[in-house]
Image (tube, helix red, strand yellow):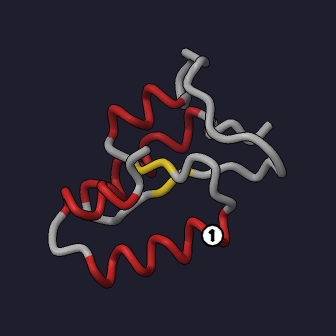
Amino acid sequence: FGGGRLPPWWLPLITEALQQRTVVVITTRCSAGGLGDEFGYVGAFHDLRRLGVLFAHQLSGPKARIKLMVALGTARNTSELRGWFAV
């Protein structure tokens, strides 16, 4: 639960959002732990990273949302925005 994996049917929706230049951030709903990259099925970390989503790692959803709002307000380009979510 909550390891940052999505059902495969979400991938086309995320792809479409990214093509429209919408920022997509993945986080976890678990109370402890972060996103895992050890799973290799469709919709797992590797597929999402390949698509270009950002990962909030250890942040909860509300904290990731606040961080994204600040990042969107201050980042001057995509590279800076990605830097806000780099490990």
- Residue drawn where x is 74% and y is 40% of the image: 33
In the picture provided, is 57 more to the left or to the right than 75? right
At label 1, the amino acid type is: Lys
Question: Dividing the picture into quarters, in which one does residue 60 lie?
Answer: bottom right
Q: In which quarter of the image is the N terminus?
A: top right
Q: Residue at x 48, y 48 (%)?
A: 55
Residue 52 picture location, percent across and down? 32, 44
Residue underneath mark 1: 63
Q: Which residue is drawn at 22% across and 62% down?
A: 80
Of all residues shown, which one is farthest toward the bottom? Answer: 73
- In the displayed structure, 43 sits above or below 26; it is above
The foreground one among 80 and 14 is: 80
Residue at 33% in and 32% down: 50
- Quadrant containing the C terminus in the rendered view: top left
Choose top left, top right, bottom left or bottom right for residue 83. Answer: bottom left
Check the image and name the residue furthest to the front. Answer: 87
Give the SS element for disc 1.
helix
Count of numbered marks: 1
Above/below status of 52 relative to 16: above
Q: In this view, does 34 lie to the left or right of 84?
A: right
Q: In this view, does 23 lie to the left or right of 67?
A: left
**Front residue of this view, candidates 41 and 74:** 74
Residue 70 in picture, x, y percent from top left: 41, 80
Can you name the residue that lies furthest to the left here? 77
Q: Is residue 53 above or below residue 37?
A: below
The residue carrying pointer 1 sits among few (fewer than 14), some (14 to 19) or many (20 or more) residues within 10 Å by Cα, namely: few
| Residue 49 placement (x, y as % from top left) | 39, 35
Q: Where is residue 9 in the image (x, y as percent from the top left)?
A: 56, 38
Is residue 9 positioned above or below 36 on the image?
below
